[in-house]
Image: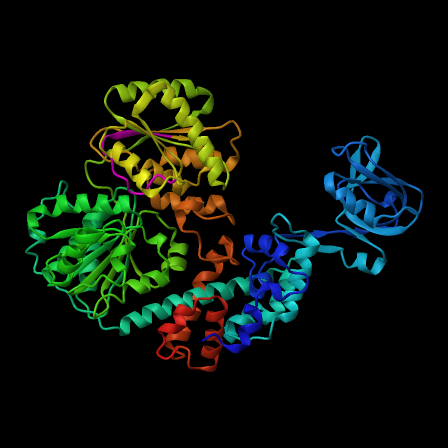
Amino acid sequence: MRPDLLNPLFAETESLDGVGPKLKKPLEKLGLTRIRDLAYHLPDRFVQRRSIADLDDASVGEQVVVPLTVIEHRSGGSTRAPYRVMAQDAKGNVIALTYFGRASYTGRKLLPVGEKRWVAGKIDQYGQMLQIVHPDQVEEDSSAAMGRLLEPVYPLAEGLTQPRVAGLTHQAIQRCPDLPEWIEPGVLAKHGWPAWRDAVQRGHAGPDGTARDRLAYDELLANALALMLVKADNRQRRGQSLQGDGRLRSKLQLPFPLTGAQRRSIAEIEGDMAQQAPMLRLLQGDVGAGKTVVALEAMLLAVEAGAQAAMLAPTEILARQHFETLSRLAAPTGVRIALLTGRDKGRARESTLMSLLDGSIDILIGTHAIFQDAVSYRNLGLVVIDEQHRFGVSQRLLLTQKGRRTPHTLAMTATPIPRTLTLAQYGEMDVSKLDELPPGRQAIDTRVISQDRLADVIDGLARHVESGAQAYWVCPMVHESENEDLAAAEARFGVLQARFGGVVALVHGQLKPDEKDAAMARFAAGEARLLVATTVIEVGVDVPNATLMVIEGAERFGLAQLHQLRGRVGRGSQKSVCLLLRGEMLGEVGRQRLALMRETQDGFRLAEEDLQLRGGGELLGTRQSGETPFRIADLEQIQRLLPMAHDDARLLVERDGGLASPRGEAARVLLYLFERDWGVQLLRGG
């Protein structure tokens, strides 16, 4: 149960003055549905203004507060023309307060002729005339205006204004209770951090690095603590020790000998599975590093030890692909592998469920359907989760409740994650890394080409397709808007279809799942020779005959995403090529990214470089990365404060007996504040 102390913070935003159905929508868009969300909705930056007596004291481009007397209103005649309110200072200097569109109503209302007002805004020049476009504030008395000399600038959504958001955050801060201190006293003193409520107040009042660090640290500590509790709880759970005798694994006939990294990872997994405590391990493998083979070895080990294994894939097409690959690789061993997806109905589904229960299926592969209530196993010993970032910790915990005893868990991801973020997202797991490519894999020839040469690229594509090979064409991320991405893809599809006819297929996020599967299946079977796609092109889709990847607008993608997309080719024995088409507007970061793509195919290096290039921006290609789990801590703070938060959390769990001490009680409040309460629920009687 959430502590009562936090109830004011979890009240809905509608309980604030002035919030009705109309404001609720834009607030929801920003994720501001409760008082705590507003308290943590910190300004992006602050505008610093200078108070001046008259315009002689100001320079163009400066932010000021100045007393002015209104002399006349000039409407521009048409709705598109600017609406100007002419005003003068104490010395008679004239300035135009300019409004466009519907904002002119504001000018009419706030600036009556003959009245004196204190106006805040940025001084611009228009021809010979000084002007302030859309003044930030217009106040009737000087004291209100002087309160605006340092003003927060908040992230907004359509329908919200800066004053409105500032007013709501102010109300939210008023409602913040005093919370007990959960940070270790030594850490608090060393950094000179304020108490929680004080930090929230200061975070909104001005550019205060100390207060912001304190709030970021709280978030990192909550996360580290929850993951550590999962780990501690896992150690106490009764799993089953699974030790194979090698009889099935020795029958495998793999196309390549195992790499050193694969052998090392298999040995780590084998060691974990032999323990009573359930394994929690993350297998990080670069694109094409052979994670599937490592997973198969682990699943065969479970079967040798008399247990069943289940593999969870994020989409149906990936589940089918794993099923085909694993069935082919495991054929010599004679193990029984089955597929279960949400689409299976009726008798076929019943028969699979019966065979799982009586143990005649050894390995089950599927989507979320394999963990529905109706699905029971005779003895589930190992769960493999593919593309780990699509499943949150709470889902991971759900899976582990399927066996009579907690099964071992092996999570896999092909998104190389920088070290710092591995700790942030998977702090409860041990990590194995596949950082070598299997022999026989050829480097992918990566070239950067200007969009001007599009006609040449399409001619080259024609020669490629005529030779019997296949290709991908990935369309640019236009904005964060799926619709515009889709429009770009449909336009490109139209052009390529006009040239190549029916051998072109189109895949995008708004297709129904079975339409998407059908298009992918046509491409996998070789009926479609060219696949045009938005960024939804599935992670892990495996078409060895596809040896050309064209990425349009490559400068718009994150490094990790470019690396993922490039990894769709180079899967067979043929030489593969990746063409990065760049637009004219290539910024410095875009240039560095494309240069790095040409220079290296090491995903782990690219992930670290991506982190440096993005700085405080978003992480690892927005759609692919599973996002950082943090809203308050930025990248720089994560890198600087996370190791410390991790140590502090360990101290609390190991030395202070979990959450039983007074600081532990406070930490429990922290976990609920950041909704990491699945961590609390693991504590007996939490």
Q: Is residue 57 above or below residue 241?
A: above
- Position of 525 with respect to 74 (left or right) is left
Q: Say if the magenta span includes residue 660.
A: no
Q: Is residue 505 above or below residue 151?
A: above
Report the predominant secondary structure element of the magenta stretch.
loop
* Quadrant (top left, top right, bottom left, bottom right) of the N terminus: bottom left
Q: Residue at x 42, y 21 (%)?
A: 454
Q: Residue at x 61, y 57 (%)?
A: 21
Which one is in front, 72 or 286?
Answer: 72
Residue 95, quarter of picture? top right
Q: Residue at x 28, y 71 (%)?
A: 235
Confirm whether residue 427 shows in the render.
Answer: no
Q: Say if the magenta span includes residue 539.
A: yes
Structure colour scheme: rainbow
Q: Residue at x 13, y 43 (%)?
A: 328
Q: Is residue 525 above or below residue 607?
A: above
Which one is in front, 637 or 158?
Answer: 158
Which range of residues does the magenta coloring cover? 536-550
* Quadrant (top left, top right, bottom left, bottom right) of the C terminus: bottom left
Q: Position of residue 446 (x, y in %)?
A: 35, 30
Q: Position of residue 18 (x, y in %)?
A: 68, 61
- Position of 616 with respect to 537 (left or right) is right
- Position of 406 with respect to 357 (left or right) is right
